[in-house]
Amino acid sequence: MYMSSTPIESEVVFSGRRSATYRDALHLFPDAWLDDIAAMRRFLQPVDGRRVLEIGAGNGHFSRAIAEDVGPTGLLVATDPSTEQLEDLEIESGGRIRVFGQAAHMLDLPIRDFDMAWSRGAVHHISDKTAAWAAIAAHMRPGGKLVIADIFAGTRLAAYFDDFIALSCCTGHEVSFLSREFATSLCALTGWDKPQFTDVTTRWRFDTKADLGHFLRLLFSATETFTDDDCLVAAERHLDIVSDGNGIALLWPMTVMETTRLPTAN
């Protein structure tokens, strides 16, 4: 059963047309993000029996992989302010995934003491990051691990989003990118240890550049004004596209932040 809260305006963007095209992108190109799944497993390490909290689960692409890794004795709780993309996830999982329609800054779940928390590509949509960090901390056991993979301020990826995605996306893309300095302050203010940061570049793999352009137009739900080729040209302007075996790959440079929940004060 879904639990609802009223998220602030910038956090509900994945509904309607944008939700549908995002889902279509990953349905048509299911292997595009295999590197991203591998990166999640490298940093989060969701092994058998772990209780995992996912922030901004989107369409459940990472949720399914995490639930598979934690096995029948583990639990994944997937949260997102918009549950439109997650409607079937809980049923499909046979109860190993619980879904709650809650925004990160208002998180209040009936389940606590998570071993780890994961968020990929969602934090830049959260306006009140201080409240979000504190809310996640309140749901973690002492020593619990938080892993965030996202776009950070001042990077090529941030420039790509500010220059083209904000212009072309049907919902716009007014967001707030983290800096390493602010993320470190957030952790200190909300009960987390000093974070570590790692720059990670994954490869989004496709057979052709035409496939990549189509994937990007769907993933970021470009308006009718923009073609597949427009989306490809913008990616080429800001990012790197390389030959990858029999096809091509878009190099996707994100930053991973890792930290742990400090012991609760007596």
Image: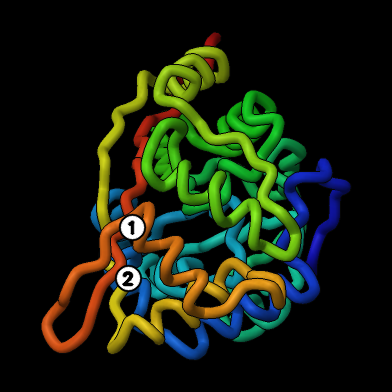
Tell me if residue 38 can be seen.
no
- In the picture shown, does residue 108 fall above or below 34? above
Residue that appears at 54% across and 41% down: 113
* Distance Cα–Cα, label 1 vs label 2: 7 Å
Q: Secondary structure at mark 1?
A: strand
Question: In this figure, what is the number of numbered marks?
Answer: 2
Q: Which mark is residue 252?
A: 1
Describe residue 158's horizontal placement relative to residue 90 as left or right: left
Task: Work out whether residue 126 can be spotted.
Answer: yes
Q: Amino acid at mark 2?
A: Trp
The percent position of residue 260, horizontal first and vertical second, equals: 39, 30
Question: The C terminus lies in which quarter of the figure?
Answer: top right
Between 105 and 231, the one nearer to me in the picture: 231
**Spot occupied by residue 177 in the image (x, y as percentages of width and height):** 54, 35
Quadrant assignment, res 95: bottom right
Residue 42 in percent (x, y) is at: 24, 55
Tell me which residue sits at (69%, 80%) in the image: 20
- Left or right: residue 122 versus residue 260 is right
Q: Percent x, y for residue 218?
A: 58, 77
Which label belongs to residue 204? 2
The structure's colour scheme is rainbow
User: SS class of the residue under badge 2?
Assistant: strand
Instruction: Residue at 39% x, 66% y: name it.
Output: 70
State yes or no: discs 1 and 2 in contact (Cβ < 8 Å).
Answer: yes
> Residue shown at 53%/37% (left/top)?
140
Residue 228 is tagged as none
